[in-house]
Amino acid sequence: MKRNTLNKSLPIFHSDGFKTHRYGKLLLFCGLVILFSCKAKKLATVNKGTPDSAAVKPVDTKALKLGAVRSAQTNFSTFSGKARTKLDIGGNSNDVTLNIRINRDQKIWVSVTAIAGIEVARALITPDSILLINRLQSLYVRKPFSYIHSFTGEHVNYKTLESLLIGNAIPELINEDTNFKVSNDSTVLTGNLQGLIYKLLAAPNLKITQTNLNNQSAGQSLQVNNSAFIQSGNRIIPSQIDMASVVKSKKIQVNLHYIKIDFDQPLEYPFTIPSRYAPAN
C-alpha cells in the first residue's frame, strides 16, 4: 500500500512539475528585482545630499564687495590731462593751468602755466624724490619724497598722489580690515590705518566720490571730493577734483577741473635744471 500510494503521488508531482518549475523561476526573479530595487533606493537615499552639503561654503560678502571696489578703479599705463586749477597755499591763491602726465608707478610730471600760457613752474615726482623748478625766480628744489609730508602729512605717499589725480581710491585704504556698508545709493568704506581714520564714499558704479583722512593727534587731515564724471574710451574719471590738506597751521587747497584727458598714449617727461638756477632755501 505504501508503495502504491507513493507511486500514485509521483505522477501527480510530475504532471504539475513543469508548471511548478516555471512559476517558481518567475517568482524568484520578481523577488530579486524587488530586493535590489529596495537596496538601490536605500543607497540613493543615503548618498543624496552628502557631497552637496560638503561642497556648500559661506559667501564672503565683504571680500566680494572690496574686490568689486578695487575692480572699479581706473587702470592705466600712462595718463595725460589738462586742468584749469585754483591753487591756494596758505591763503595765497592763484588761477593756473596744470598739464599733468603720469607714467604709472614711476613718475608724475607737472607743468604749471599762468595766463597767456607762460610756464611758471615744473615738477617731477617719483616714489623716491621731488624736483621743482621756479622759472619766475630761477630757483629749484631737489628733495626726497618725504619733503611733501610737511604740506600733506605722513599718510601721503607716491601712490596716494597718483590715485588722487585720477579719482581712484587710495590702495592702502581698501584692505581686509576695511568696513563697509550700503547707505542709500552710496557704499561707505571706513577704517583705521595706523592711527589714520579714513572714510570713503563710492557711487553706485563704485567710483570714489569722497575721501576723508584724519589723524587728529598729528593735526593732519585731507578731504577730497570727486564730481562731474566724464568718460574717455572705456574709462570713467571725475573731471572735477577738489582737495584740501591741513597739516597743523599749513593749509593747501587745490581745485582741478580737467578739460582734456588721454590714457595709454606715448608721453615724454622733460625735466632739466638750468645751470643758472640756484637751490631754494
Image (cartoon, grey):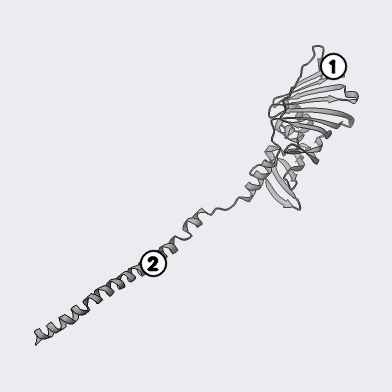
Amino acid under disc 1: Ser
- In this view, the mark in front (2 or 1): 2
**Image height check: is 68 above or below 247?**
below
Question: Please, what secondary structure does the residue beneath circle 2 have?
Answer: helix
Amino acid under disc 2: Ser
Q: Quadrant of the C terminus?
A: top right
Looking at the rendering, which quadrant does residue 37 occupy?
bottom left
x%, y% of residue 192?
69, 43
Disc number at residue 138? Answer: 1
**Image height check: is 144 above or below 31?**
above
Mark-to-mark CA distance, 2 and 1: 97 Å
Looking at the rendering, which quadrant does residue 144 occupy?
top right
Q: Residue at horizontal 30%, vertical 72%?
A: 26
Label total for image = 2
Residue occupied by mark 2: 37
Q: Residue at horizontal 18%, vertical 78%?
A: 14
Left or right of residue 36: residue 155: right
Q: Residue at horizontal 88%, vertical 24%?
A: 117
**Image height check: is 252 above or below 19?**
above
Contact flag, marks 2 and 1 (Cβ < 8 Å) = no
* Nearer to me, 23 or 59: 23
Mark 2 or mark 1: name the one nearer the start of the chain: 2
**Residue lying furthest bottom:** 1
Q: Residue at horizontal 9%, vertical 88%?
A: 1
Question: Please, what secondary structure does the residue beneath circle 1 have?
Answer: loop
Residue 249 appears in the figure? no
x%, y% of residue 72?
69, 42
Looking at the rendering, which quadrant does residue 251 occupy?
top right
Residue 119 appears in the figure? yes
